[in-house]
Image (cartoon, rainbow, N blue to C red):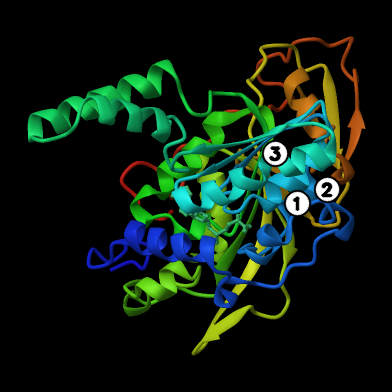
Amino acid sequence: MSSDVCCSSLNVESAVRERYSAAAHQAEAALCCPVSYDRKFLEIIPPEILERDYGCGDPSKHVRAGETVLDLGSGGGKICFIAAQVVGATGRVIGVDCNDEMLNLAREYQAVVGDRLGFHNVDFRKGKIQDLKLDLERFEKVLAENPVRSSSDWLRAEEQANSLRASAPLIADNSIDVVVSNCVLNLVRSEDRRQLFAELLRVLKPGGRAVISDIVSSDDVPLELRADAKLWSGCISGAFREDRFLAAFESAGFHGVEILERQSEPWTTIGPLEFRSLTVRAFKPQPTATSDFRHAVVYRGPWKSVTTDFRQELARGERIDVRDAEFAMLAQTPYRDQLVLLPNANVEVGEAPSGSLFVSLGLAPDTGGCCSPGSKCC
Ligand SMILES: C[S@@+](CC[C@H](N)C(=O)[O-])C[C@H]1O[C@@H](n2cnc3c(N)ncnc32)[C@H](O)[C@@H]1O
């Protein structure tokens, strides 16, 4: 049995809920993976929040002024309060968590931080990060008015949840510049992970990016460890295998997937298994434009050739003709430095004639990868 299929004996969601409800009240050292944040952003954050730091990286380093940021599994709100300072008064930050105690903790200090900052640009919302359409606080109101006492009530509640997802989504489609998360994705049930990555892609604006810090494992985590509630809720046994973490972004349709930071020494080990923090960035594609192959790029090297996320090989030194949207994408991070950019190289030629040397990089994600429907890789 693949280690990606988790053990039905463990109720992951209640193990995680109980652990973090307690950790919201009392700082828990075992959940801390040392991270060095930029100290200037910590000054206005109350000690009660800094003490309950359960992160393993600092994705807020990759946020820019004016952006709309979504923090998945915001906990006490530390990353949101740092990001609030970086994005400034013209940006905004939304923290999502499903744990009442954590939300209470973050909301308790939200006004204090905003007052110290001189503007209020953060809000915390209750939801599951694998279901960012359902606003759990709105749903709670519906349930209070329509208590569930029978299976028919339950079926009606499901319909009401679906109607809320459609009419008032917690996070709207294409609304976020950058999704960040700090040590949370590993806590999500294996069977929900495909939907989790699909949700990241849904909420991002075209061209937006995800910057995720999480714990990864050096090899498959054996089933007996994955059935251990304490290890799972402690961000250990739900860790993605390192290569699969990157593959999960790719399979969901992201491109430009890149390791930004990788802890050199493991955070913890169990037998031969190493668990460490990884920060990954990945981009949501822009829609494909149907324009001429006006521009060109040349791959600089140093590799003899590289393969794009759209399965096209770029040979070192070879000129590849591209369309407007592809050129715009390649002219930005993370591709720009790898390529010689030749804007308007083909103004004379216009549209690629059939059978010519013109090549499209293609922006449509490949759906035939390891996470195609029915596979169990993420
Ligand atoms: C390890 S803590 C990290 C908290 C915070 N990101 C930080 O850096 O301190 C994990 C947080 O994710 C929340 N969480 C876990 N699974 C979740 C899910 N499926 N949906 C929403 N929040 C979740 C927990 O309630 C907890 O607050």
Q: Which residue is mark 2?
A: 316
Count neighbours of disc 2 (C-alpha within 10 A) and say few if under 14, some if 14 to 19, many if 20 or more.
some
Q: Is residue 187 visible?
A: yes
Disc 1/disc 3 C-alpha distance (Å): 53 Å
User: Eyeballing the image, is 304 above or below 162?
Assistant: below
Which quadrant, please, contains the N terminus?
bottom left
1 or 3: mark nearer the eye: 3
Count neighbours of disc 1 (C-alpha within 10 A) and say few if under 14, some if 14 to 19, many if 20 or more.
some
The percent position of residue 17, horizontal first and vertical second, equals: 40, 58
Q: Which residue is mark 3?
A: 111
Q: Name the residue rendered at 43%, 66% in the picture.
A: 19
Q: Nearer the viewer, residue 195 or 339?
A: 195
Residue 305's disc is 1
Q: Name the residue rendered at 58%, 81% in the picture.
A: 268
The percent position of residue 248, horizontal first and vertical second, equals: 51, 50
Give the residue type that dot 3 points to.
Answer: Ala
Q: SS of the residue at dot 2?
A: loop
User: Eyeballing the image, is 31 above or below 357?
Assistant: below
Picture quarter containing residue 15? bottom left
Picture quarter containing residue 158? top left
Give the residue type that dot 1 points to.
Answer: Ser
The reply to whether the C-beta atoms of the residues labelled 1 and 3 are less than 8 Å apart is: no
Horizontal side, residue 149 vs residue 338: left or right: left
